[in-house]
Amino acid sequence: YDVTFTGRDNKLQYPFQTSWGSTTRLIGACIMTHSDNNGLVLPPAIAPIQVVVVPVAQHKPGVLDAAAALRDRLTALELRVKMDDSEQSPGWKYAQYEMKGVPLRVELGPRDIAEGKCVLVSRVDRSKTVVSLDGVEDAVAEKLAAIRDELYEKALANRQAHTYDCTSLDEIKQKLGENGDGFVRAMWCGDPECEDKVKELTEVGSRCIPFDQEQLSDKCVCCGRPAKKLVYWGKAY
């Protein structure tokens, strides 16, 4: 499978080949990082449907035509847009697309059409924003960018809150025991035997050696010899 991820600035793209194994791990990581008790929460860049247009009171004259026109305008932005004109109630549709993790919902009913506006609803916090139909393209693009940034900042804050700096094996066990699972940052001498011993005694293994190194201490968290690298440690699932 060819997968392209886009940087936060929407300028840089990183295409690479992936396999079923890595793809399912990425999906699992996304679900664990962003989703909530109501279902998926997908970042706009990877959501199969980025915007869903839900016509309200679609049986009334002109509603479906206006919703279809709105869908076409947003699709012209090269967004992945769906209009749900099924016979299900609007409430059912709202719940359905929230569960599927669609980042942005656009509601459009007779009163909205008469007033030249529509309602944007974010999947992240279900906040509603009333916007003019005349400027809906810019409003949707800005809202999707805001959703992307909000998900990123929320995930970053969660990771930082569950990452602990430790200088001994006892401290690793204490931090994880008090706070539950998370990541540990600790120094390592470079000896594979120490790496194995940390995992044996604390149940956390080495996950990565960051490019940007910091010197938390001068000694290996395991043996006390001079440390060579800062390592992120964590449980494997």
Image (cartoon, rainbow, N blue to C red):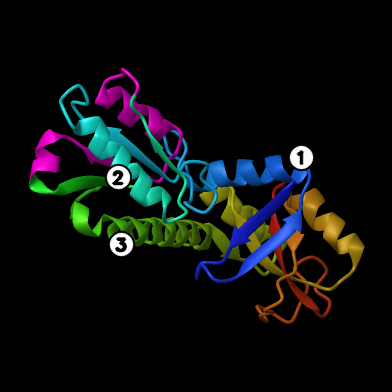
Graded by Cα atoms within 10 Å as few (under 14), some (14 to 19) or many (20 or more), the crowding at tag 2 reads many
Residue at horizontal 40 percent and vertical 61 percent from the top: 145
Q: Relative to the observer, which residue lies in front, 9 or 32? A: 9
Can you tell which quarter of the image residue 31 is in?
top right
Of badges 1 and 2, nearer the viewer stands 2
Residue that label 2 marks: 70
Sequence-wise first label, 3 or 1: 1
Of badges 2 and 3, nearer the viewer stands 2
Q: Is residue 161 above or below residue 24?
A: below
Q: Is residue 231 above or below residue 102?
A: below
Q: Is residue 123 visible?
A: no
Is 234 in the magenta?
Answer: no
Graded by Cα atoms within 10 Å as few (under 14), some (14 to 19) or many (20 or more), the crowding at tag 3 reads few
Residue that label 1 marks: 20
Can you tell which quarter of the image residue 77 is in?
bottom left
Residue type marked 3: Asp
Question: Where does the image place residue 71, in percent across and percent down from the top left?
Answer: 35, 43
Residue type marked 1: Trp
Is 101 in the magenta?
Answer: yes
SS at circle 3: helix
Q: Relative to the observer, which residue lies in front, 38 or 203? A: 38
Residue that label 3 marks: 138
Question: Where does the image place residue 116, in percent across and percent down from the top left?
Answer: 13, 49
User: Is residue 182 rendered to the left or right of residue 112?
Assistant: right
Q: Relative to the observer, which residue lies in front, 159 or 187? A: 159
SS at circle 2: helix
Q: Is residue 97 visible?
A: yes
For the magenta stretch, what is the residue range? 86-114
Of badges 3 and 1, nearer the viewer stands 3
Question: Where does the image place residue 95, in percent across and percent down from the top left?
Answer: 34, 28
Sequence-wise first label, 2 or 3: 2
